[in-house]
Structures are given as C-alpha cells and as structure tokens.
Amino acid sequence: VAVGAGSDLVDKGVVDRREWAELERRARTFVDGVHQGRSA
C-alpha cells in the first residue's frame, strides 16, 4: 500500500480521511489473507 501517496491525497483534500482509513484497513486485511493462504 502506497501510504505516502495516500496521505498526500488526504492532505490535499482529494480523499476523505475516514475513506482513506477504510481503504487502508481493507488493504491490510487482504494482504494478511494472502500471507495466510501462502503459509497454509
């Protein structure tokens, strides 16, 4: 996840802060699922 780019957009008001937090949370959940799938 490109956190730097995302917070940049948030600072500029392009992306809502809560919206970004939700996207970040989904991305983490997805990545966690991928890692668990590989190690299983």
Image (cartoon, rainbow, N blue to C red):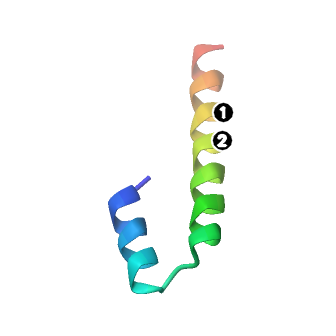
- Residue 7 image offset from top left, x and y in percent: 40, 67
- Residue 18 image offset from top left, x and y in percent: 64, 68
Which residue type does callout 2 highlight?
Thr
Q: Is residue 34 above or below residue 37?
A: below
SS at circle 1? helix
The residue labelled by disc 2 is: 29
Name the residue at the top extreme.
40
In the figure, is residue 6 to the left or right of 35? left
In the figure, is residue 17 to the left or right of 9? right
- Residue 15 image offset from top left, x and y in percent: 53, 79
Q: How many marks?
A: 2
Between 16 and 33, the residue placed more toward the observer is 16
Q: Is residue 27 above or below residue 35?
A: below
Please identify the quadrant where the C terminus is shown.
Answer: top right
Q: Is residue 5 above or below residue 12?
A: above
Give the class, few, some or many, for how many residues have Cα within 10 Å of label 1's Cα (few <14, many ≥20): few
Q: Which mark is drawn over residue 9?
A: none
Which residue type does callout 1 highlight?
Gly
Q: Are marks 2 and 1 in contact (CB under 8 Å)?
A: yes
Q: Is residue 36 above or below residue 20?
A: above
> Measuring 57% from the left and 71% from the top, which residue is drawn there?
17
Between 35 and 15, the residue placed more toward the observer is 15
User: What distance separates the C-alpha of mark 2 from that of mark 1?
Assistant: 6 Å
Which image quadrant is residue 11 in? bottom left
- Residue 37 image offset from top left, x and y in percent: 65, 24
> Measuring 63% from the left and 50% from the top, which residue is drawn there?
25
> Measuring 57% from the left and 55% from the top, which residue is drawn there?
24
The residue labelled by disc 1 is: 33
Between circles 2 and 1, the one closer to the viewer is 2
Which image quadrant is residue 19 in? bottom right
Give the class, few, some or many, for how many residues have Cα within 10 Å of label 2's Cα (few <14, many ≥20): few
SS at circle 2? helix
